[in-house]
Image (cartoon, rainbow, N blue to C red):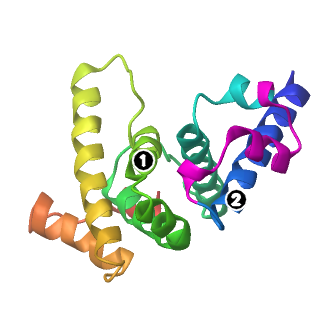
Amino acid sequence: MARRNKSTEFLKECIADALLKLMEEKTLSQITVLEITNTAGVGRATFFRHFSSKEDVLTFKLLLLWERWAQEHELIDISKFSLYTTKELFSFNLSIKPLLQKLYTENLQNCVYDAFSNIMAPQFGSDVVQCYANRFYTYGCFAMVDEWIKRGFLETPEQMADIIIHEIVGKNVTLTEKEEQA
């Protein structure tokens, strides 16, 4: 079963990489699924077995990039909101700046939001209050990232986290020692 999962993930990433390669020369709307599958070396059935749209492929790639980045940076809990995670999310987004600029040029912010939503707040949970709080922070943080991207990444990730911590959450809020080490 583990081998099958690895091959599935490999095929999905091949599809995503093929799409990104094609997007270097064409807009998303000009790219066909057949072009993607031919470039990836997979069949159309493989594409539709794993994705419902080209946008889903892009969201998958963003999630994969986040998981790898988080692992490389030894983030402990990447799916729970904290002020520390927010700073790390800005750092991650800066690390994929060219991809984000391409997506925004093509008005594909929805792919970024879908990935962001999956990263920041799982869709369901047993604690209703925590689910609502996670969703609140997800929308707010995405709005900040969205504006930051649109403004050309002018501030550093640290400055963006500082804006959230001191100007939006509260002037007297500081990261706890636990959050700083997370």
Q: Residue at x 32, y 83 (%)?
A: 154
Q: Secondary structure at mark 1?
A: helix
* Residue 30 placement (x, y as % from top left): 59, 52
Would residue 12 appear left or right of 101 to someone viewing this image? right
Please check the rendered image and state whether residue 36 is part of the magenta-colored stretch, yes or no.
yes
| 154 lies above or below 68 | below
Asked if 100 appears above or below 159 in the picture, the reply is: above
CA distance separating discs 2 and 1: 24 Å
Bounds of the magenta segment: 27-45
Q: Is residue 24 left or right of residue 95?
A: right
SS at badge 2: helix
Please state which amino acid type lies under the numbered disc 2. Leu
Is residue 48 something one can see in this rendering? Answer: yes
At horizontal 81% and vertical 39% (from top left) the residue drawn is 11
Residue 175 visible in rendering:
no
**Relative image position of residue 167 (x, y in whole percent):** 11, 68
**Identity of the residue furthest to the front in this view:** 30
- The image quadrant where one finds the N terminus is top right
Q: Nearer the viewer, mark 2 or mark 1?
A: 2
Q: Residues within 10 Å of mark 1 (few under 14, many from 20)?
A: many
**Residue position marked by numbered label 1 in the rendering:** 116
Left or right? Give the position of 160 relative to 25. Answer: left
Q: Is residue 147 left or right of residue 112?
A: left
